[in-house]
C-alpha cells in the first residue's frame, strides 16, 4: 500500500536556477511562505470568509486604480467588437 502513495515534487525544485532565485525572492517578500507547501493550513470552511456585499464589489471595481478609465468601462461594447475582430469572428 505504501508503494501506491506518490510524493508530489516541490514546485521550486522543478524550476531552472534563474527562475528558482526569482521565486525565492518573491517568497521572501511574503515572509517565506510557499503556497505550494502550506496546504495543511488551508480550510474549506466558507464560514471563515469575510462577508462581501454588492457595494463592496462595485467600490473595488470602480474606485481601484486601473489602466481603464470610466469611459473605457462604459464603452464595453466597442471593446467586445475589437476582441471579436482580433479573434477572427468578423
Image: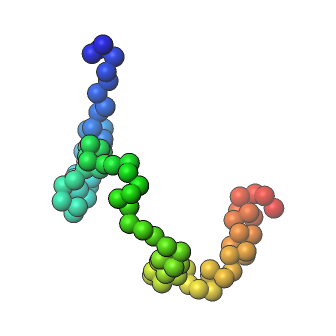
Q: Position of residue 25 (x, y in %)?
A: 21, 58
Residue sitting nearer the eye, 64 or 88: 64
Where residue 52 sits, quadrant-wise, is bottom left
> Which residue is at a point 38% across and 48% down the rendered structure image?
44
Q: Is residue 65 visible?
A: yes
The residue at the far front in this view is 47
Q: Position of residue 59 (x, y in %)?
A: 49, 81
Q: Position of residue 64 (x, y in %)?
A: 45, 80
Quadrant in which the C terminus appears: bottom right
33 up-or-down from 79: above or below: above
Q: Is residue 35 left or right of residue 74?
A: left
> Which residue is at a point 31% across and 21% down the rendered structure image?
5
71 up-or-down from 5: above or below: below
Q: How is the image coloured?
A: rainbow
Q: Position of residue 19 (x, y in %)?
A: 29, 49
1 up-or-down from 31: above or below: above
Quadrant in which the N terminus appears: top left
Residue sitting nearer the eye, 4 or 8: 4
Where residue 87 sits, quadrant-wise, is bottom right
> Which residue is at a point 38% across and 51% down the rendered structure image?
45
Q: Is residue 19 visible?
A: no
> Which residue is at a point 71% across and 69% down the rendered structure image?
80
Residue sitting nearer the eye, 42 or 21: 42
72 up-or-down from 2: above or below: below
Q: Is residue 79 left or right of residue 4?
A: right
Q: Is residue 66 left or right of residue 6?
A: right
Q: How many marks?
A: 0
Where residue 49 sits, quadrant-wise, is bottom left
Amino acid at each position: 500500500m505504501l508503494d501506491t502513495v506518490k510524493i508530489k515534487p516541490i514546485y521550486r525544485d522543478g524550476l531552472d536556477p534563474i527562475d528558482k532565485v526569482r521565486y525565492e525572492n518573491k517568497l521572501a517578500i511574503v515572509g517565506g511562505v510557499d503556497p505550494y507547501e502550506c496546504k495543511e493550513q488551508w480550510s474549506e470552511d466558507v464560514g471563515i470568509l469575510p462577508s462581501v456585499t454588492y457595494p463592496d464589489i462595485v467600490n473595488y471595481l470602480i474606485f481601484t486604480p486601473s489602466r481603464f478609465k470610466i469611459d473605457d468601462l462604459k464603452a464595453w461594447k466597442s471593446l467586445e467588437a475589437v476582441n471579436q475582430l482580433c479573434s477572427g469572428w468578423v
